[in-house]
Structure formats: C-alpha cells, structure tokens
C-alpha cells in the first residue's frame, strides 16, 4: 500500500514552500482525501504534469480564475483580472515548482522519477481526468477566500522494479 500520509505531507510541504517563497502568500492546508478519477464539470484553471519512474501518474494544480490571477499578480508584480498568456504561464510555472519539489523529496521513498512539462487547461464547464482508473490524493489549500487543490495519482510502473516502502498493485488506497 502506498503511504498516503507520507505523500500528503510531502505535497503539503512543497506547496506551502512554493507559495511562501515564490508568491509571498501563505496557504492553509485542508483535510486531504482520496477520490476516484470521476470529477464533475469544472471551471477555472488546471495545470497537469506527468511523472514517470518506478511509479507513474499525473499531478495537477486546480484553481478558479481569481486564484490564478492572484498568483500571477503576486509573481509578476502586476495586476491581473482576467486570464491571459502571462497568467497561464505563471500557473504552469507554479505547478512545475510544486511538483518538482515534491518529486525531489519523494524520490527518497518512490525512487527516481522524471517530470513532463506542464499542460494548462482553462475554460468553463469542462471535464479533466486521466485514462487510468486509479484513486487520486487531493490536498486542498485555502489562501484567504481563494482555494487551490493539489492532486496526485500514481500507479506502479509494471515494467520497472520499485522501492518496497510503498508496495501495492492498488497504488493509492
């Protein structure tokens, strides 16, 4: 069984560090939970990044447009009220930093991993899911009235050996 608490704590630490250091924002962690990969319609911004190694999957940062604009305003020192290329670039870069930090820390118990470049999706009333039918760890954060969710779905890479500190064919449970 994958050690969900260890994963959750690593995601929390990485997210708090990036928000504090890069954006000058403090976030409060909510209660983490798991969900099956069956989300309802969504609106806002989702940035997805792939992970590969002994464990494979995806990680994503999800927020509404006001939080995406707030992150861009904090990082770039300009006011953003609407989604544009700069805002989407910031969300992509923040995703890269959070998941990159997570990856570096998690490699001690998940083994070496590689990251893809982030893909950012923006719009109204869309669905986003991975093709795998795995459970997903969701770690919600509050930043004032704005919310951000960090999601992670990992499965064993059946073609590679993995470290046995996290061992189960059911991945996250």
Image (tube, grey):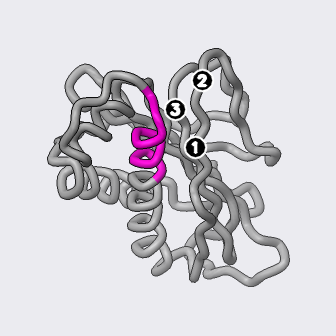
Q: Which residue is tagged 1?
A: 120
Q: Which residue lies at the image location 64% right of the left edge and 60% below the top edge?
A: 50
Q: Is residue 81 above or below residue 33?
A: above
- The one nearer the camera, 90 or 140, is 90
Q: Which residue lies at the image location 50% right of the left edge and 77% below the top edge?
A: 107
Mark 2, other Cα within 10 Å: few <14 / some 14–19 / many ≥20:
some
Residue 141, percent across and down? Answer: 33, 35
**Helix, strand or loop for disc 2:** strand
Residue 123, percent across and down? Answer: 60, 23
Q: Check if residue 35 falls in the magenta segment.
A: no
Q: Is residue 167 above or below residue 82?
A: below
Q: Which residue is tagged 2?
A: 123
Q: Which residue is tagged 3?
A: 45
The answer to whether mark 2 and mark 3 are in CB contact below 8 A is no
- The magenta stretch is 83-92
Say left or right for 31 vs 99: left
The answer to whether mark 3 and mark 1 are in CB contact below 8 A is yes
User: Magenta region, mostly helix, strand or loop?
Assistant: helix
Q: Is residue 173 above or below residue 84?
A: below
**Helix, strand or loop for disc 1:** strand
Q: CA gap, disc 1 to disc 2? A: 10 Å
Q: Which residue lies at the image location 73% right of the left edge and 67% below the top edge?
A: 156
**Helix, strand or loop for disc 3:** strand
The answer to whether mark 1 and mark 2 are in CB contact below 8 A is no
All told, the count of numbered labels is 3
- The one nearer the camera, 6 or 25, is 25
Residue 15, percent across and down? Answer: 33, 52
């Amino acid at each position: 069984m994958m050690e969900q608490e260890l994963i959750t704590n690593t995601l929390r630490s990485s997210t708090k560090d990036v928000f504090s250091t890069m954006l000058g924002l403090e976030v409060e962690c909510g209660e983490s939970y798991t969900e099956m990969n069956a989300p309802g319609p969504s609106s806002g911004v989702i940035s997805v990044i792939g992970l590969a190694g002994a464990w494979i999957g995806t990680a994503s940062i999800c927020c509404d447009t006001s939080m995406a604009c707030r992150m861009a305003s904090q990082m770039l020192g300009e006011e953003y009220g609407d989604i544009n290329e700069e805002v989407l670039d910031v969300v992509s870069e923040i995703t890269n930093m959070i998941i990159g930090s997570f990856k570096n820390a998690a490699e001690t118990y998940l083994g070496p991993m590689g990251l893809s470049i982030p893909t950012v999706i923006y719009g109204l009333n869309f669905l986003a899911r991975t093709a795998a039918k795995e459970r997903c760890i969701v770690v919600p954060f509050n930043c004032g009235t704005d919310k951000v969710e960090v999601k992670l779905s990992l499965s064993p890479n059946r073609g590679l050996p993995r470290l046995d500190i996290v061992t189960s064919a059911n991945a996250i449970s």
